[in-house]
């Protein structure tokens, strides 16, 4: 019996956990980016309607932040691996429309042969093909047939991967802007609109 995907038990859309992926990127930049990591997680909690101050404080605590990000990313990846190419195009539909306007439908038409394929499975096929070709370049014995097959795989999926990659990078860019705007707003408000001291 197939294990039920954990995202089916969530009370919110698992896509909201994308902020954890951005938080991971900030975390890799070192201590200077820690405030942006915290802000990413604060916004994530807000998006999934968690407002309890104790929970927010715990989850954004620098001592547990890495664990928090890992746990949220584990759930996010569970949702991500269920996505077909069509699911991805629907999710990023507004971005496609912004870029291509009335020509958006052409993307769906051209990528229709891949519509029902799981995107992560396509990625895995491409990674395997890339390893085959890299091995050949490094002197590993690879048959001509395997090389041809790997090259055909890369060519077959090039447009799908490039399209989804562009859309995902744009989404990440929008999330980073949202995080940084919110963080900068907090800084200015702390200077000019200080909260009254508690008695």
Image (cartoon, rainbow, N blue to C red):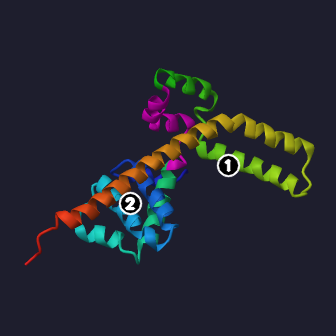
Q: Residue 29, position in %: x, y? A: 51, 67
Q: Does 12 sit above or below residue 39? A: above
Query: Can you say whether 183 is above or below 54 in the image?
Result: above
In the rendered image, residue 37, in percent from the top left (x then y), is placed at: 41, 65
Graded by Cα atoms within 10 Å as few (under 14), some (14 to 19) or many (20 or more), the crowding at tag 1 reads few
Residue in the picture at 29% in, 67% down: 56
Q: Check disc 1 and report the residue beneath it.
A: 124
Please state if 169 lies on the left or on the right of 52 as rendered: right
Give the position of the C terminus as an image quadrant.
bottom left
Per the rendered image, the range of residues in magenta is: 80-100
Q: Quadrant of residue 187?
A: bottom left
Provide the residue designation for mark 2: 40
Give the percent coordinates (x, y) of residue 92.
Answer: 47, 37
**Considering only order in the chain, which callout, 1 or 2, is on the residue closer to the N terminus?**
2
**Location of residue 96 in the rendering, given as x and y in whole percent from the top left corner:** 48, 32
Q: Nearer the viewer, residue 29 or 155?
A: 29
Is residue 133 among what the camera can see? yes
Q: Is residue 83 magenta?
A: yes
**How many discs appear?**
2
- Outermost residue toward the front? 192
Mark 2 or mark 1, whichever is nearer to me: 2
Q: Residues within 10 Å of mark 2 (few under 14, many from 20)?
A: many
Left or right, 106 with respect to 159, comes to left
């Amino acid at each position: 019996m197939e294990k039920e995907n954990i995202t089916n038990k969530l009370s919110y859309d698992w896509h909201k956990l994308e902020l954890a992926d951005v938080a991971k990127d900030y975390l890799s930049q070192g201590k200077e980016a820690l405030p942006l990591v915290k802000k990413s997680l604060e916004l994530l909690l807000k998006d999934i309607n968690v407002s309890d101050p104790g929970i927010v404080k715990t989850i954004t605590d620098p001592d547990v932040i890495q664990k928090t990000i890992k746990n949220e990313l584990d759930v996010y990846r569970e949702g991500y691996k269920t996505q077909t190419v069509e699911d991805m195009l629907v999710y990023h539909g507004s971005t496609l429309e912004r870029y291509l306007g009335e020509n958006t439908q052409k993307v769906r038409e051209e990528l229709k042969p891949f519509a029902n394929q799981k995107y992560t499975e396509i990625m895995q096929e491409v990674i395997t093909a890339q390893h085959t070709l890299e091995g050949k370049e490094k002197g590993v014995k690879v048959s001509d047939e395997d090389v041809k097959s790997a090259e055909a795989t890369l060519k077959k999926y090039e447009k799908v991967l490039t399209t989804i990659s562009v859309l995902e990078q744009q989404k990440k860019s929008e999330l980073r802007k949202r995080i940084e705007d919110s963080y900068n707003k907090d800084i200015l408000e702390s200077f000019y609109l200080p909260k009254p001291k508690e008695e």
